[in-house]
Image (cartoon, grey):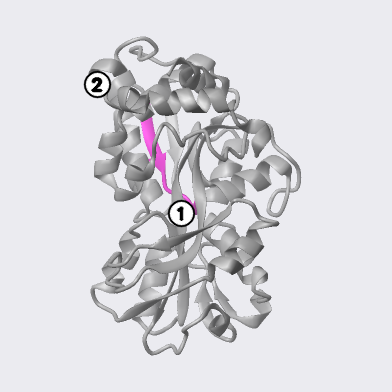
């Protein structure tokens, strides 16, 4: 949403300083704003399923915060985006990884959220989550429309995966009445496909998805494409969707697979102190290399793109960090 973006000038300046900001390493983390302590003694980071990028990256980030500030920083494994937002609204967590569509709905009080919330502020736009629709060679599913009448895993109920799966299905004129719905997370969906209990599954995450990567080593899988023209049409009403390709060889696929993607968001409680969020933001960007080593998806996070497409108000502490770059 444009109303939450910083000025173009700030974005350009931030982009120009990306290498300097990300190259400071641990030495820079101890400088201005790095500090040795936080006002808060606890930084609980809500993530997602145990095998997903959220949890892998979040666990690494929690270790960084614990080592840097001596706080009790840990991850909380959840059903992902919708649950994470609700936990933040209930003041049960300090930070969360979420999909931008869910954050947008929470801020506006739409879909799964009955009223707008002002308890969520954003630190950064992260990396794209790719909608990965996987099926088997025996299912007979070749196009998105072939999902009709099939048994489909759409993610945990009210998760970000389920929210965007439902939106994409409806964008193709398909409702849950037209398919057999199973609410399953990544690992459970992979197990269901392997056991022949599912025809297809939505696994929306960064690339690669660990459960899907493991599945591809033991099962002849196929990725179902989404026509870029269909994505663009759906994006007219749901602007957080973009058309991207799953690169060739990600899961043994010979060619790139067109699909939809949604940016991920790193959010914090709005009532966290400006100084704390400044330090958490600075340390996050100082350790991008460490986060990228934990999961490939984090290598797509950059300082210059972190302020593009924000869907919640930028926390003043994060804004101060960006303005200083």
Quadrant, the C terminus: top left
Provide residue 23's location: percent of width, then percent of height.
27, 25
Q: Secondary structure at mark 2?
A: helix
Q: Residue at x 28, y 16 (%)?
A: 28
Q: Secondary structure at mark 1?
A: strand
Q: Is residue 38 above or below residue 89?
A: above
Mark 2 closeness class: few <14, some 14–19, many ≥20 residues within 10 Å: few
Quadrant, the N terminus: top right
The residue segment tinted magenta is: 72-80
Mark 2 / mark 1, whichever is N-terminal: 2
Q: Is residue 198 visible?
A: yes
Provide residue 90's location: percent of width, then percent of height.
61, 36
Q: Residue at x 60, y 59 (%)?
A: 163
Provide residue 236's location: percent of width, then percent of height.
68, 57
Q: Residue at x 45, y 81 (%)?
A: 198
Look at mark 2 in the image and give the residue it sits on: 26
Q: Quadrant of residue 312?
A: top right
Look at mark 1 in the image and give the residue it sits on: 129
């Amino acid at each position: 949403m444009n109303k939450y973006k910083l000025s173009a000038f700030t974005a350009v300046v931030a982009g120009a300083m990306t290498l300097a900001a990300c190259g400071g390493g641990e030495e820079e983390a101890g400088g201005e704003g790095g500090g040795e302590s936080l006002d808060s003694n606890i930084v609980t980071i809500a993530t997602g399923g145990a095998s997903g990028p959220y949890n892998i990256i979040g666990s690494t980030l929690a270790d960084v915060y614990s080592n840097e500030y001596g706080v009790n920083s840990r991850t909380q494994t959840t059903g992902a985006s919708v649950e994470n937002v609700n936990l933040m609204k209930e003041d049960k967590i300090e930070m969360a990884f979420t999909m931008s569509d869910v954050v947008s709905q929470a801020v506006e009080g739409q879909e799964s959220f009955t009223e707008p919330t002002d308890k969520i502020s954003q630190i950064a736009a992260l990396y794209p989550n790719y909608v990965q629709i996987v099926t088997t060679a025996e299912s007979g599913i070749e196009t998105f429309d072939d999902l009709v009448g099939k048994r489909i895993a759409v993610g945990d109920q009210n998760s970000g995966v389920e929210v965007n799966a439902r939106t994409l299905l409806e964008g193709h004129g398909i409702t849950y009445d037209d398919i057999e719905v199973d609410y399953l997370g990544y690992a459970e969906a992979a197990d269901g496909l392997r056991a022949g209990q599912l025809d297809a599954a939505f696994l929306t995450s960064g690339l690669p998805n660990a459960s899907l990567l493991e599945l591809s080593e033991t099962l002849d899988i196929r990725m179902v494409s989404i026509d870029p023209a269909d994505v663009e049409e759906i994006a007219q009403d749901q602007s957080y969707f973009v058309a991207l390709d799953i690169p060739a060889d990600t899961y043994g696929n010979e060619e790139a697979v067109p699909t939809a993607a949604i940016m991920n968001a790193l959010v914090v409680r709005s009532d966290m102190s400006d100084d704390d969020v400044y330090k958490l933001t600075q340390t996050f960007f100082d350790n991008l290399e460490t986060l990228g080593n934990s999961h490939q998806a984090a290598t797509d996070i950059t300082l210059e793109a972190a302020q593009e497409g924000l869907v919640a108000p930028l926390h003043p502490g994060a804004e101060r960090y960006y303005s200083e770059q």
